[in-house]
Amino acid sequence: MSGLAILGQNVFSGIAIGGVYALLALGIALIYRSTNVTNFAQGDITMLGAYALYILLEQLGLPYPIAFLLAIVVMGIFGWLFQRFVYYPLRNRSFLPVIIATIGAGILFQNVALVVFGSIPRKVNPVFASGGFTVGGVYFDLQYIVILVVTAALFVFQYLFFEHTSLGKKMQATAQDKTMAQLLGIPVALMIAFTFIYSTILGAIGGMLVAPIYFVTNRMGSTLGLKAFAACICGGFGDVRGALIGGIAIGLIEALGAAYIAPVYKDAFPFLLLLVFLLVRPQGIFGEKVSEKA
Amino acid sequence: MKKRVFACILAAAMLFCLAACGGGSTETTSPATDAPSTDTPASDSDVIKIGHIVHMTGSAVESGGYEKNGAELAVEEINAAGGVNGKQLVLVQEDGKSTNQGSVAAFQKLLEDDEIVAVIGPSPSTQFAAMIPTIDEAGIPVATGGTNYSLTHSDCPWVFRFRPHDGFSAQAMVRYAVDELGATKIAVLHGSDSFGVGGYDLVAQYLDELYGMEPILDQSFNNDEKDYTAVITNIKESGADCIISYMAMSPDVGMFATQRLQQGLDIPWIGSPSVTAVAGRELAGEALYGVYAVSDFHVDGNEKATAFAAAYEEKFGREPDFYSAWTYDAIYCFAEAFKNAADLEPESIREAILALEDFEGVEGTYNFDENGDGLDAYYIVVNNENNIEVVTKIEGNR
């Protein structure tokens, strides 16, 4: 295996996994922008999305597109319930109780999944059964390509939706200034609910995309969520481009670090990057130097 | 109203937690004196009690179940055949809670019962290692199924091991790789935990001792790794012609097996026993076909094993594995020692166990050395389209 092929193999898998981090980071960023709180349950929502796909696809035997869409609908409803019972009752409190509530919700999700599904990992088949192909010594896993395509499509959708639709603009306005949005007659609570639903769906899609690669367990979301959080900080908290760039940077640095330094420290590299950012550029790549929002 | 809804959810969550805890403790508070077919004994001297630390709660609950079943089956058979010197065996079970301190506490609780003459410990090596100081102090024979080399080499004369230790598995893998597969460049893939690192050290030691070779690659990874691209490219790059692996977790086995083939790494692979575990095979499917492993128990290993497997399947509705095999053997060995011993004092039992010669068990033929190691042989098995078949049996140098 040539040096170039080794590099190519690791870059490819790094970017693909980074795409998943980016999707989760995007969900965290959107919620942060509209509510000023961080959703630490995002990783566990990913896990629930993977289980939803597992039930619909493997247990009920539905075809892939239907199972995928149905899982999105189910998780969308779940996103609404999540904001209704975790965020909404605490919406007028400071950010700390809300963050603790999301951490608590994450722990609850993990343990409920353990009770319901047990500790044995579940297998979900990839979108394309054929697996992948090899070009120039680099193996291209079709599932990784699916991850890249879906991530790219979602970021394009995101851009079009927020910049070119009335609903998207209302959601943006809510994110920028809740009071002003309210004065303009935008139903702020509804917009926040939409944001939670959309973010939950993003996390769940991330989970469904990695399910065939990771196997589905109740703990699969915890490291995913933490790395997405690191991606958010590196990219600039609450920034959409930052989520994308941060996610892919985290994916790449862990893949290359594992390949060229040592696989044992794989999980350490993203957090090393995080530390560097916190020391050198705490506002992240795209962040603005603002200490406190008015 | 909103507050009430939230309070209701909180209350429900708390109830849920309470219910979960409650479930755990009811199990533990019944340290079953449920030795089957024990009719209430006329006097205490009519029974011989054996303590058993079983993980009934926590992460090792699945293997704990197998251990419990194996021991109960042996006690039931021995009692049905008239017991030991006319006395019925009684199993006293305590929950080890899958933790070090839980196991030590369970052992201490068993020691409170003066009638218990021997104890069966939990399988995981770390938990058994935690118990050793207490065992040394208590001075009664304790059986283990942990394979970490140090358990029987820590100057505690009361530990008896009913599975071959990791030194023998490393020898078996190295010998098969070099002698039968003709490997000259062996890559060792192992977890970064004590099991994996210890395994690597033993493989390196025996490669050097037996063949004057050294591993071409020392490749470690963290348990729960999801993407083996870096590991696979490293192995390819090293030019290895055989992989020896110490992986502790089934999902890791499943994932590595699948990704290695996708990325075109198709060289012979001999793994530690987890490679044959059902969970890993279900995840990996065809990707594990043709892969070799070491295994200390096989249902077709000997006649006793076959009979045991049939009895086990009839009673519990599924195939036994090595967890149930070693507790079954431990009970039979203890019973034989009780029969031969002058009395039921710890020292007499210990001497009787050490004096056992070629004692046939379902795991193999037991001959205990002064360290308390009863077995020294591993099977090399192969996954033939999801059937685990014995290729050969390799005895280790003690």
Image (cartoon, coloured by chain):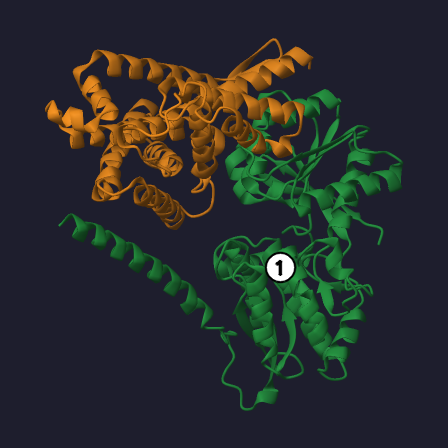
Chain colours: A orange, B green
The x and y percentages for residue B323 are 60, 56
The x and y percentages for residue B256 are 59, 31
Residue B18, visible in the rendered structure: yes
Residue type for callout 1: Gln
On the rendered structure, is B316 left or right of B364?
left
User: Which residue is drawn at the image coordinates 47% and 31% (left, top)?
Assistant: A227
Q: Chain of mark 1?
A: B
Q: What number of labels is visible? A: 1
Q: Nearest the camera: B356 or B24? A: B24
On the rendered structure, is A26 left or right of B202?
left
Q: Residues within 10 Å of mark 1 (few under 14, many from 20)?
A: many
User: Which residue is drawn at the image coordinates 28% and 33% (left, top)?
Assistant: A75
Q: Nearest the camera: B115 or A144? A: A144
Instruction: Name the residue beneath numbered marker 1.
Output: B127
On the rendered structure, is A88 left or right of B245?
left
Q: Nearest the camera: B24 or A177? A: A177
The part of the image, by quadrant, that contains residue A86 is: top left
* Residue at far bottom of view: B43
Residue A73 lies, with reference to residue B320, above or below; the image says above
Residue B223 lies, with reference to residue B162, above or below; the image says above
The part of the image, by quadrant, that contains residue A207 is: top left
The part of the image, by quadrant, that contains residue B180 is: top right
The x and y percentages for residue A113 are 37, 45
Q: Quadrant of the C terminus of chain B?
A: bottom right
* Residue at far top of view: A136
The x and y percentages for residue A198 are 27, 27
Residue B82, visible in the rendered structure: no
* Residue at far left of view: A185
Q: Indicate the secondary structure of the residue bearing disc 1.
A: helix
